[in-house]
């Protein structure tokens, strides 16, 4: 039951569990989360309650529909304590940035063992014999069965469950033949399974046929009357996968006609099957040649402990901001790589956010052309097998300062969709020939923001995996460059436009672009002091990179335009001539620098305008990272 949140304490994240889950995982969750176990909820009640919850834990009974997901306000994860996610609207979850996780192998042994239990029950009429005896009968001759040894088991879907079933069936002395367009020939051979080209090739060979595919659009109704007719007369069929993969009506008539000698079904098109006695499912359950179980494939103590622990651990990982090991709608990276990648995930997100806050402004049309972002990796980071989380981090960083993110979370799951919706193109490049700057760090990440038509836009010389930042900068007139690295797991910005720097992108920052001449620190310091703004740290960044890339913020107040509409930087040439309209104050004031200040409070437009009014300050932007 829900534990009440203590007054004065931060509310603990809440987990809703509307199904019967093993206590093991729930106990783990209760250490840090509030878990509500509420069974028997209607879809409407679920929709009413879901806004309160951060995580939803389900098995196969709860229909996690788009309507339910849309009603959620802070849901981060739907955890399916089992394999099949056909009861979850995964595309809707993806759109909303909700991670869907499952337990891909916690119950596969149980499902395979149940399949074998049904296989032997079918072969030896076990349920019928039991019922007969309980009814006071002794029907030895009616209940003669068949042996499985030497018979052929046809497996449709040689995945995890299918393979375990195959090995067990081999142990029973059966010949095993499988149809699975995606299965590996060598894996099949290692399990002594003959992999055939098609279902049509498999069907006439099978004495027993067992289904182990997921429920997909392509597998729904995969075995209908046409397929059943291709089977041997007297063959038997098992379905422990999903109802509806074998057409229930077709199965019923094949049983009635005697073409199929027996079926065992654990799963139904609709669960529980409708009570309408005329429905195919109800008639199937009642059919004397059918053995039916109420979706018990995963129902063992061991399997339920496994899946419960598996998904609850993942819920904790997700709520802690980590990547889960079995996300259905996110690519999985190796845990070892994840550790190394995580600091860069933070870095890239900060770089994206810094770009949006420092270089763009809704009032500056020129910036709207910039829709292409080259994310260039140099050094050790290039050895990572997946940089997907970095891509997601960039999209999150770029968009979060400009979106109303309430209830919507850009993450690894939906980053691609968000990028598409916003017309953002990202070219990820690995540079094998590090730039001079990169040579100073074990890994360097550079973000080049530029105008471009998208994926093909890299042809402006920017797709080169060997170019340096400087070469890139001079190849296009409107572009902005930010570089960063990680040290001791902390992100650092090492380049902002033409300026080389080193600061931790964290907290409230004021970035002043000014002429590099004595007295500027004092000028800025005294303006901020008068306004009651404390400076936590300060870093001066000289202009060390040449080229036309900008160094000044555009979402800032500037000397030419106190409203902050200026300063794309394209006018600030390498010679530093004050291209944004400000005249050099003296002939000495031709070089520029950035002053990056960590401040303790938001700096208002009035303060920024006052700063820009000060002698030699070109423009000012404030960012929160
Ligand atoms: N009755 C129960 O309680 C349980 C049922 N299941 C069901 O069993 C299914 C299989 O589970 P796993 O083996 O773990 O999944 P899996 O993903 O490891 O294997 C599924 C296999 O089906 C194959 N496949 C896909 N489309 C196919 C097609 N058109 N024709 C032939 N093969 C095709 C895939 O290539 C894959 O090898 C699950 O999706 C779930 O629906 C799983 C656990 C318990
Ligand atoms: O894991 C699966 O795919 C299953 O079908 C098991 O379903 P259940 O968790 O027992 O409702």
Image: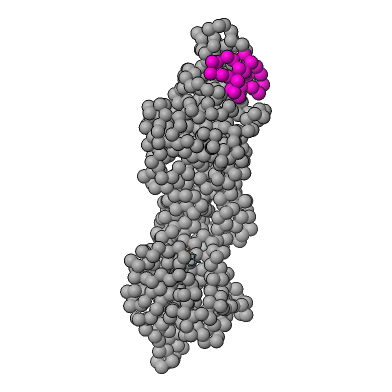
Count of numbered tags: 0
Answer above or below: position of 44 versus 249: above
Along the viewing direction, whichever of 326 and 548 lies nearer the viewer: 548
Q: Position of residue 366 (x, y in %)?
A: 65, 29
Tell me, yes or no, whether the highlighted magenta stretch contains residue 535.
no
Q: Residue at x 57, y 6 (%)?
A: 586
Q: Main secondary structure of the magenta part?
A: loop
Along the viewing direction, whichever of 533 and 448 lies nearer the viewer: 448
Q: Position of residue 510 (x, y in %)?
A: 54, 22
Along the viewing direction, whichever of 374 and 294 lies nearer the viewer: 374
Answer above or below: position of 238 versus 13: below
Answer above or below: position of 174 versus 531: below
Q: Residue at x 59, y 23 (%)?
A: 570
Q: Residue at x 40, y 63 (%)?
A: 184
Tell me, yes or no, whether the highlighted magenta stretch contains residue 561.
yes
State left or right for residue 158 relative to residue 90.
left
Q: Residue at x 39, y 47 (%)?
A: 334
- Residue 254, can we see it? yes
Q: Position of residue 389 (x, y in %)?
A: 47, 43
State the image quarter where residue 587 is shown: top right
State left or right for residue 337 relative to residue 371.
left
Q: Position of residue 441 (x, y in %)?
A: 38, 29
State the image quarter where residue 567 is shown: top right
- Residue 54, can we see it? no
The magenta segment is 557-582
Indicate the colouring scheme.
one colour
């Amino acid at each position: 039951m829900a534990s009440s949140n203590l007054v004065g304490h931060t509310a603990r994240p809440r987990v809703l569990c509307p199904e019967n889950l093993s206590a093991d995982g729930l106990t783990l969750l209760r250490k840090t989360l509030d878990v509500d176990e509420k069974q028997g909820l209607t879809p409407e009640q679920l929709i009413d309650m879901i806004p309160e919850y951060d995580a939803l834990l389900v098995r196969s009974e709860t229909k996690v529909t788009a309507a339910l997901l849309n009603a959620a306000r802070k849901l981060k994860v739907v955890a399916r304590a089992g394999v099949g996610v056909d009861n979850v609207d995964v595309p809707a979850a993806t759109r909303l940035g909700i991670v869907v996780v499952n337990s891909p192998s916690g119950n596969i042994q149980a499902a395979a063992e149940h399949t074998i239990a049904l296989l032997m029950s079918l072969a030896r009429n076990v349920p019928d014999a039991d019922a007969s005896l309980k009814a006071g009968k002794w029907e030895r001759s009616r209940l003669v069965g068949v042996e499985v040894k030497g018979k052929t088991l046809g497996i449709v879907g040689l995945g995890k469950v299918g393979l375990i079933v195959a090995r067990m069936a081999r142990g029973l002395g059966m010949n095993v033949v499988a149809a699975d367009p995606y299965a590996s020939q060598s894996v099949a051979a290692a399990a002594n399974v003959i992999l055939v080209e098609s279902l049509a090739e498999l069907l006439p060979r099978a004495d027993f046929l067992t289904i182990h595919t997921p429920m997909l659009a392509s597998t729904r109704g995969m075995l209908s009357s046409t397929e059943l007719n291709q089977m041997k007369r007297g063959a038997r069929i098992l379905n422990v996968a999903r109802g509806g993969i074998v057409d229930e009506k077709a199965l019923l008539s094949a049983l009635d006609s005697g073409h199929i000698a027996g079926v065992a079904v654990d799963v139904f098109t609709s669960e529980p099957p409708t009570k309408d006695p005329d429905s195919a499912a109800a008639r199937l359950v009642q059919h004397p040649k059918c053995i039916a179980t109420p979706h018990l494939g995963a129902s063992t103590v061991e399997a339920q402990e496994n899946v419960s622990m598996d998904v609850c651990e993942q819920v904790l990982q997700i709520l802690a901001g980590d990547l889960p090991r079995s996300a259905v709608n996110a690519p999985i990276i190796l845990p070892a790589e994840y550790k190394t990648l995580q600091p860069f995930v933070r870095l890239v997100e900060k770089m994206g956010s810094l770009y949006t806050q420092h270089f763009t402004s809704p009032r500056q049309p020129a910036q709207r052309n910039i829709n292409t972002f080259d994310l260039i990796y140099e050094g050790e980071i290039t050895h990572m097998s997946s940089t997907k989380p970095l891509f997601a981090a960039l999209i999150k960083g770029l968009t979060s300062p400009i979106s109303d993110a309430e209830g919507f979370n850009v993450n690894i799951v939906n980053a691609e969709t968000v990028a598409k919706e916003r017309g953002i193109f990202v070219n990820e490049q690995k540079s094998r020939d590090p730039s001079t700057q990169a040579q100073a760090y074990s890994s360097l990440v550079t973000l080049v923001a530029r105008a471009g038509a998208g994926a093909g836009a890299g042809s402006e010389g920017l797709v080169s995996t060997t170019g340096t930042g400087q070469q890139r900068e001079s190849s296009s007139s409107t572009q902005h460059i930010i570089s960063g690295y990680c040290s001791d797991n902390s992100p650092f910005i090492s380049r902002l436009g033409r300026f080389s720097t080193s600061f931790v992108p964290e907290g409230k920052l004021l970035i002043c672009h000014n002429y590099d001449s004595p007295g500027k620190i004092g000028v800025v310091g005294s303006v901020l002091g008068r306004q009651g703004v404390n400076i936590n740290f300060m870093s001066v960044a000289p202009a060390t990179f040449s080229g036309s890339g900008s160094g000044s913020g555009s979402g800032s107040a500037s000397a030419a335009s106190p409203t902050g509409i200026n300063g794309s930087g394209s006018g600030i040439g390498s010679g530093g001539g004050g291209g944004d309209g400000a005249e050099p104050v003296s002939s000495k004031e031709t070089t520029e620098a950035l002053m990056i200040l960590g401040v303790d409070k938001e700096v208002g437009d009035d303060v920024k305008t006052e700063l820009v009014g000060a002698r030699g300050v070109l423009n000012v932007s404030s960012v929160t990272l």
